[in-house]
Every structure is written in structure tokens, then in C-alpha cells.
Amino acid sequence: AILAPAAGPLAGRHALVTSGPTHEPIDPVRYIANRSSGKQGHAIAAALAALGARVTLVAGPVTLPDPPGVTTLHVESAREMLAACEAALPADIAIMAAAVADWRVAREATQKLKKEPGAEAPTLSMALNPDILATISHHARRPRLVIGFAAETEHVVEHAIAKRARKGCDWILANDVSGDVMGGDSNRIHLITAEGVEDWPEMSKGNVAQRLAQRVTDATD
Ligand code: CTP
Ligand code: CA
């Protein structure tokens, strides 16, 4: 079939989006992960595609279907997610919505750890994972607009303002995860930019995605 060129206000733009958790292996049958359904990141990828962007979605392990009209790359670990993101550059816009595991197990066992009779529980030694958002924000081929999320359980806006500075990104979408947002269908967002803080009313993750895609369109005109 011959595809018509993408139409819409983001036509000709390439957007990179991360979504879902990462899985950090302990041994062949066990892993450490973050809580994340991928609903918000996948909705953002779909909303950008609906406005005509070419979208590369780097997704950790999720049970969601690949969004239509989006190139979806499936990864497991934070290091794989970073490699896929760097390989996808250049991009005009990057939105890092994944719940990346901050730590991985320092030495992944090649064989299943065995529970020997009488033995103590194992101690896991951890290593720091790369920060994908910070790496992309300081990249030689930095996208023009880099956006991160901040999942906080307290002092949401203060932590998010500090996080924006620390990461070197343009915008942070802060959300309060002290309730049951994880896996839920709605979000209350505070958008942190260089200009200040915008409080969005509680809305569905689909509506957050549409509102963000519209803001991205206005900012990259
Ligand atoms: N992020 C990332 N790579 C990591 C950790 C986080 O790209 N290794 C991104 C997330 O996708 C999100 C943003 O950074 O867009 C903030 O993630 P968050 O976990 O809230 O921040 P951290 O810097 O990891 O701080 P902390 O978990 O201590 O609050
Ligand atoms: Ca973190």
C-alpha cells in the first residue's frame, strides 16, 4: 500500500518516547522492577503520532499493545533502554515517561540462585543504572525539547523543580504517586518549565497525553 505522507501540526518531526518499567535481572528467573503500567507513556506516543509526528517508542515490559502508527522498540533493562534511545537519535522531541529502575543487580547470576537447606537469604549487591533523561538532556545530539516526569510521594512540586535542574531537561511533568496513580487511569500533573509551575486539573492519562502533545506543538512551532 502507498501511505500518504503524515499530515498534522507535528508532520516532519521525530519524537522519542520511553514508557513502562525496566526489568533488572537477578538471575535467569528473577528480576527487580518499578511499578509502571506504561499507560501514560503509550498514550503520549499515540497522541504525538495522531498530530503527525514520526514516533519512536522505547518500551519496557508492558502488557499494552503497541500503539498504532508508532515504531515500538521493546527492551528489558535500563541499559538496553538507553542504548535504544541513543540509537534512535536525532529527534526533535524526547519525552521520558518510563519508570526506570535506579539500580540493577551488580552481578547477574548466569544460573538460577538456589535455596540451599539451612543457608541464609542472599545479599544483593547493587549498581547504579545510567540516567536516560539526564544523558539525553546533555547529549551532543540533544533534542530541541526534552521532557521528563517526576513521580513523587511528598513535596511534589519542590522535588520536581529540583529534578528539572538536576536532569537538565526543559520540562518536568510532576505527578503525585502517593495515591493509586500507578496502574490507574488518571493523573494530576504539575507542569514545571523555566517560566514556572502550571497546575493541571485531574484528568485521564489520555487527556494528559493530548494536552501535552498540544503544548509540544505550540512550543516547537
Ligand atoms: N529517568 C531516567 N533514567 C533513570 C531514572 C529516571 O531516564 N535511570 C527519568 C524518568 O523516566 C523520569 C525522570 O527521569 O522522566 C525522573 O524519574 P524519577 O525516578 O522521578 O527521578 P530520579 O532522578 O530517579 O530520582 P528519585 O527516584 O530519587 O526521585
Ligand atoms: Ca528514580
Image (spheres, helix red, strand yellow):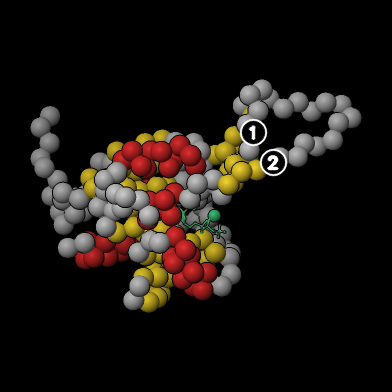
User: In this rendering, does residue 116 appear at all?
Assistant: yes
Between 109 and 48, the residue placed more toward the observer is 109
Q: Residue at x 10, y 40 (%)?
A: 4
Q: Disc 1 residue type?
A: Arg
User: In this rendering, does residue 43 appear at all?
Assistant: no
**Callout 1: few (<14), some (14-19), or many (20+) C-alpha neighbours within 10 Å?**
few
* Dot label at residue 8: none
Q: Residue at x 77, y 36 (%)?
A: 122
Locate residue 110 relative to residue 182 in the image: left or right: right
Residue 2 x/y as whole percent: 10, 32
Provide the residue designation for mark 1: 107
Between 44 and 133, the residue placed more toward the observer is 133
Q: In which quarter of the image is the N terminus?
A: top left
Residue at the outermost top position: 111
Look at the picture and state if 186 lies above or below 120: below
Look at the picture and state if 142 lies above or below 76: below
Residue 50 x/y as whole percent: 23, 51
User: Ligand 2 is found in which quarter of the picture?
Assistant: bottom right
Provide the residue designation for mark 2: 125
Q: Which residue is drawn at 15% across and 54% down?
A: 8
Residue 207 x/y as whole percent: 34, 61
Q: Disc 2 residue type?
A: Ser
Q: Quadrant of residue 167?
A: bottom left
Residue at the outermost front position: 140
